[in-house]
Image (cartoon, grey):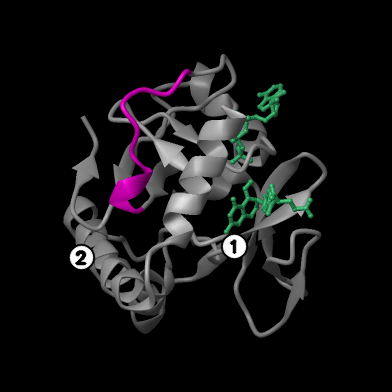
């Protein structure tokens, strides 16, 4: 798993600037195909790190429509979701988190766009290996019909693998969106 994680991380780093931009723009169109955002929905994105696919086109689209956007904030082993405003502080991994702002629990979110290192067609994911998303989303495993939050993984197509060996704590996503495909069966 460690080796696979490294290989996939290296793969996403090799995508050049022009393709990176194009793929991130396609990602917005794919996202719009999957869902029509509703006015009152609380939506979490992430700030790209370690070569992850950029969310800025999705974020800008949501901002233009006056949606409130939230970002993950590390609190112990879990994530909470902090509303984006003017002020940020870097967490221990150097990723910016909003400060002086409203913080919501996972169950208060309607949509969480989840970063990932690798995925398979069954909507399993592996992340950076810290378990933050798995710990945070663990409740979804036991409440499959729990409507909120919807979990949408965002990835480059090259992050797909044939089959991931799932661990008992892995939480399958509701959909995975790439620049060319939506996995949501
Ligand atoms: N964009 C983004 N935000 C996110 C996550 C993520 O995967 N992507 N997270 C998802 O959980 C949380 C942060 N988890 C992270 C876990 C490890 C590393 C990381 O870069 N690890 C390095 C070692 C860094 C160090 O030791 O200082 C590595 O493994 O090489 C980054 C974020 C919350 N925010
Ligand atoms: N619900 C849980 N209960 C107990 N331990 C957990 C749970 N979720 C994750 N963990 C622990 O977290 C560690 C990392 O999990 P895993 O390798 O699946 O991370 P990941 O999905 O790649 O990372 P992330 O969720 O941060 O993106 C595991 O070794 C496991 O011990």
Q: Quadrant of residue 90?
A: bottom right
User: Callout 2 environment at 10 Å: few (<14), some (14 to 19), or many (20+)?
Assistant: some
Report the quarter where the N terminus lies.
top right
What is the magenta range?
156-165
Q: Is mark 1 within 8 Å of ligand 1?
A: yes
Identify the residue at image location x=39%, y=24%: 145
Q: Are marks 2 and 1 in contact (CB under 8 Å)?
A: no
* Residue located farthest toward the top when viewing the structure as drawn: 168
Between discs 2 and 1, the one toward the N terminus: 2
In the rendered image, residue 62 lying in the magenta stretch gets the answer: no
Q: Quadrant of residue 19?
A: bottom left
Residue 85 pos. (x, y %): 63, 80
User: Which residue matches tag 2?
Assistant: 29
**Label 1 SS:** strand
Give the camera-side residue of 71 and 117.
117
Q: Main secondary structure of the magenta part?
A: loop
User: Which residue matches tag 1?
Assistant: 71
| Picture layout, residue 108 above or below residue 89 | above
Q: Report the image quarter containing ligand 2.
A: top right
């Amino acid at each position: 798993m460690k080796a696979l994680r490294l290989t996939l991380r290296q793969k996403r780093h090799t995508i050049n600037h022009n393709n990176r931009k194009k793929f991130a723009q396609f990602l917005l169109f794919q996202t719009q195909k999957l869902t029509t955002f509703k006015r009152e929905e609380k939506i979490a994105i992430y700030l790209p790190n370690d070569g992850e696919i950029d969310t800025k086109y999705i974020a800008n689209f949501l901002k233009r429509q006056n949606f409130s956007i939230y970002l993950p904030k590390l609190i112990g082993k879990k994530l909470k979701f902090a509303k984006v405003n003017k002020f940020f502080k870097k967490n221990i991994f150097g990723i910016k988190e909003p400060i002086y702002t409203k913080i919501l629990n996972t169950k208060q979110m309607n949509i969480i766009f989840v970063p990932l290192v690798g995925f398979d067609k069954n909507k399993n994911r592996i992340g950076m290996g810290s378990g933050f998303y798995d710990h945070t989303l663990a409740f979804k495993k036991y409440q499959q019909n729990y409507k909120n939050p919807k979990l949408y993984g965002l990835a480059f197509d090259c992050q797909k693998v044939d089959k991931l060996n799932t661990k008992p704590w892995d939480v399958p996503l509701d959909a995975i969106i790439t620049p060319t495909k939506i996995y949501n069966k």
